[in-house]
Image (spheres, rainbow, N blue to C red):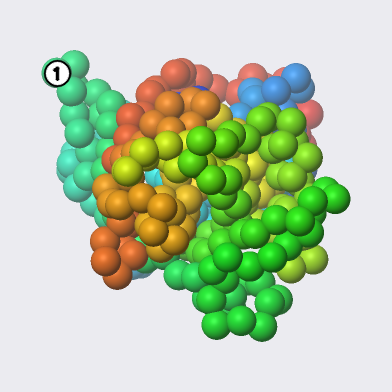
Amino acid sequence: MKNGFFRGHGLGNDYIVMDPKELTFTLTPKHIELICNRNWGLGSDGILALVPSKKADFGLRIFNPDGSEAEKSGNGLRIFARYLHATGKTKKKQFTVETKGGLVTITLHVDRHGDASAATVEMGQATFKPAALPCTLAVPELIQQPIDAAGRSLIFTGLSVGNPHCVVFKPAGESWSREDLLALGPALENHTLFPKRTNVQLAVPTGPKDIFILIWERGAGETQASGSSSCAAASAAVRLGLVKSPVTVNMPGGRLNIDVAPDFNLTMKGPVTEVARGTLSPSFVRSLR
């Protein structure tokens, strides 16, 4: 189907899936930005592009709504998996996907209607080393490091789960506000410590195996949910001894279950919803050209 798309969301974090071979235009940063615009285009937290892979069953490129490229997305991977199943590109219930943030294995959970309404993703291993983030701090690991942002002195834990994350915790019993996120999110994302920018989570432990997070995504801004952010925040919480695995990560959009192994290999399980399939109109495509 020429210029077709598949739309889905994971707990309110929505993506458009496209096959570049079926498009009559190129997914340039400007085109991606226009398609993702919620007033002038389809509206989305990003675009997932099916690409060839020599290392896995499928290849995936992940684009943010500002046209930049992300290494990995947990929600995006679940949406991409449902797209592959729903459109008949695979009949397997388990397969591999290559991303710029590493190779992952996905297991689909098919419901009684035949829909892949949930998926488990083996997200790879978390690392707290500055070079992996990357971060310019000259320390062995980014555990509980000081940072100043938006006029506030904070303590952050930095890590990579295939893409970069900066997690800031408040003690149990306290809370973060949306105003905190809107102030600290962009300030931390673009902080000079993070030359390639970073995703941001404002987190608080809420139980022995539970945390709550607010999310600011690199290149996207405030989001209702994020799989990679959930993995990062859960890993940081376990590393700091705030919770034990498996961790339930609660977000404004819902919850994900993250298993953090002793070596910090991560497994994420959560729902995924298909919303629509369609084609871009000829006039819209002409405007892209």
User: Residue at image x 51%, y 64%?
Assistant: 160
- Counting from the top left corner in percent of width and height, residue 12 is at 50, 25
Q: Secondary structure at mark 1?
A: loop
Q: Is residue 127 above or below residue 93?
A: below
User: Residue at image x 75%, y 19%?
Assistant: 39
Q: Is residue 112 above or below residue 26?
A: above
Query: In the rendered structure, which amino acid carries the disc numbered 1?
Result: Arg
Q: Relative to residue 25, is residue 73 drawn left or right?
A: left
Question: Residue beneath label 1, please?
Answer: 112
Q: Relative to residue 254, is residue 115 drawn left or right?
A: left
Asked if residue 79 shows in the view, the reply is no
Total numbered circles? 1
- In the current view of this chain or complex, which residue is farthest to the left? 112
Residue 227: image quadrant is: top left
User: Residue at image x 79%, y 51%?
Assistant: 152
- In the current view of this chain or complex, which residue is farthest to the right? 151
